[in-house]
Image: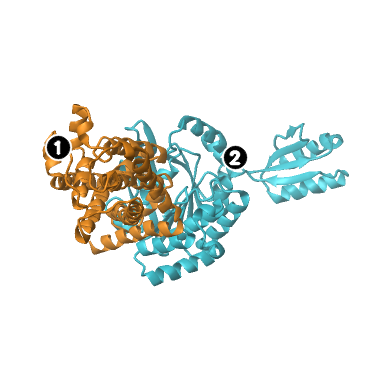
Chain colours: A cyan, B orange
Amino acid sequence: MKTVVVEELVRTYDKGSVRALDGLSLDVEEGTVLSVLGPNGAGKTTVVRILATLLAPDSGHATVGGIDVIKHPEKVREIIGLSGQYAALDEVLTGWDNLVMFGRLYHLSKKQAEARAEELLERFSLTDSSRRAIKTYSGGMRRRLDLAASLIVKPKVLFLDEPTTGLDPRGRQEMWGVIEELVKDGVTLLLTTQYLDEADQLADDIVVVDHGKVIARGTSDALKKQIGGEQLQVVVAQSNIAKTMEIVAQVSQANVHLDEGLRRISAPVTTGSSALVDVLRLLDSSGIHPLDIALQRPSLDDVFMSLTGHTAEEDLVIAESKKKGKRARS
Amino acid sequence: MKRALIDALIITRRQLLLLRRVPEVLIFSTIQPVMFVLLFRYVFGGSITSGMPGGYVQFLMPGIFVQTVAFTLAGTASGVAEDMTKGLIDRYRSLPIARSALVFGKTLGDSTLNIVVLMTMGAAGYIVGWRPTSGGVKILLAFIFLLAFGYSLSWIGIFIGLTAKDVRTVQNMSFLVTFPLTFLSNAFAPTTGMPRALQYFAEWNPVSTMVAATRELFGLQNRFGVTAGSFPSQHPLAMSFIYMFIIVLIFVPVSVNKYKNVAKK
């Protein structure tokens, strides 16, 4: 069953001059994780805001749990959890205060709300700091608490809008751990990210979004395959380069490329790991010891590059310069 | 409807928790009016001859009370703006609660804060010699009246907070609203000494009618606008009610609507 269905959403800003969504469609199968991957300004946040009933589209159609988000937003709000790009919490109140308050707003009794707060704080390793004001929390702790607040009533569908943007590597790892746990519990998750490795790590399915449209969809593996096969890369000492190129060419049966600065020889291969073994064997019999050898699959960065003609980072720079102090409506 | 009320009260409770978690808020909300009391009572007061029984402080305190209440508008507004910039409003809006609950809860919470602030101010006034003479019931009525005024103003605060979207702008905007209103009034000096044009403004100013009405309720004779004889200066209590009613009538629906549509721009 499709838990989230989005069809042909269009949403413009500034009287139609900015098309944040330009006929975007996607869906999320129940109990799976879909990552919406794209640079800043691609329309990721706009999709999430429409699905979370915060924003109405200009045209198009969207359902969450079978409920129309435009016709029955109040019903949608009962089954979703949302954790946005900012930690949406009251800074001066404690973690405990925040969770209890939101629990009460989700119509839990005082006792239930307190029990649930306790449970969530424990689960997200925040019990020790639960009686401190949020403003004393680290970025990672805030995000975890924000996520906890979106889980108070065990939502059927969870929307996470760039859950690790701005976190340090440790904060990201912790957040990933928490999200993976949630997924194990069977929540349906739509997650936006501009980090390719994050989509790779967490999602079952990925849609790549650029300029308000889906430009590719598939599993991480499928997307990588879509742009071509694997590359064999060997790094050897200067004196062995000529011979190694011969060997690689023999195995690859294709054009061999040499990066002279890195002393790296690379060539596309179709036979996967057996090509790797062949090259190693031939090198060994010629008495060459490679400094490094790898079978490189294209990264999602490569996928992004080949789909959009620019890297995610490039786009980020463009988006940032376009903003000029205006709030990003990504 | 009942649910909406409960939701509003939960938000109200949040405002009060704030008072418990950050007691400094109370100090900052009262320190400025206390300074005004001291400034007018001891620095300017000596040169202002009010001819009041009990001296200038009797004339001054109702003015200070109204000013204090008016200035809390900025607090309401920046609270809302802060929730907006931090995305907290998005969370509220994605909750299964009545959309009016947040704004109603905020105004109620800020009014409750006003109770504490007014009590502190009353105590400060008492220390510097303020002695209302109208008796318990009328004094209580005066404070309720002040709270009602504060409540109606907090709806303007909500509107400003939702409109400006950034805390600094909000503070400037609130200042632009409250500063002329509180100083171009009878709060600190009788309007009779003002230039003619200013006098008209001051007499129709809701702050003046509020101050005059509160003075009456605290047992002072209405000495406001004796020369101009305009309607508000003769019926300050009635006129204050009309003002509050107009403010609520305009700003409640406008603010609630603004809140509902705030993300749709």
Please provide percent x and percent y for residue B213.
Answer: 19, 47
Residue type of the residue flagged with mark 1: Val
**Quadrant into which the N terminus of chain B falls:** bottom left
Relative placement, left or right, of B5 versus A316 is left
Pinpoint residue A61: horizontal percent, then vertical percent: 32, 47
Splitting the image into 4 quarters, where does residue B161 fall? top left
Same-chain check, marks 2 and 1: no
Is A253 located above or below residue A34 in the figure?
above
Which residue position holds label 1? Answer: B226
Label 2 – label 1 distance at C-alpha = 82 Å
Q: Which mark is residue B140?
A: none
Q: Is residue A149 visible?
A: yes
Which residue has dot 2 on it? A302
Chain bearing mark 2: A
Q: Position of residue A221 (x, y in %)?
A: 57, 50
Tag 2: Cα neighbours inside 10 Å, few (<14), some, or many (≥20)?
A: some
Looking at the rendered structure, the kind of residue marked 2 is: Asp
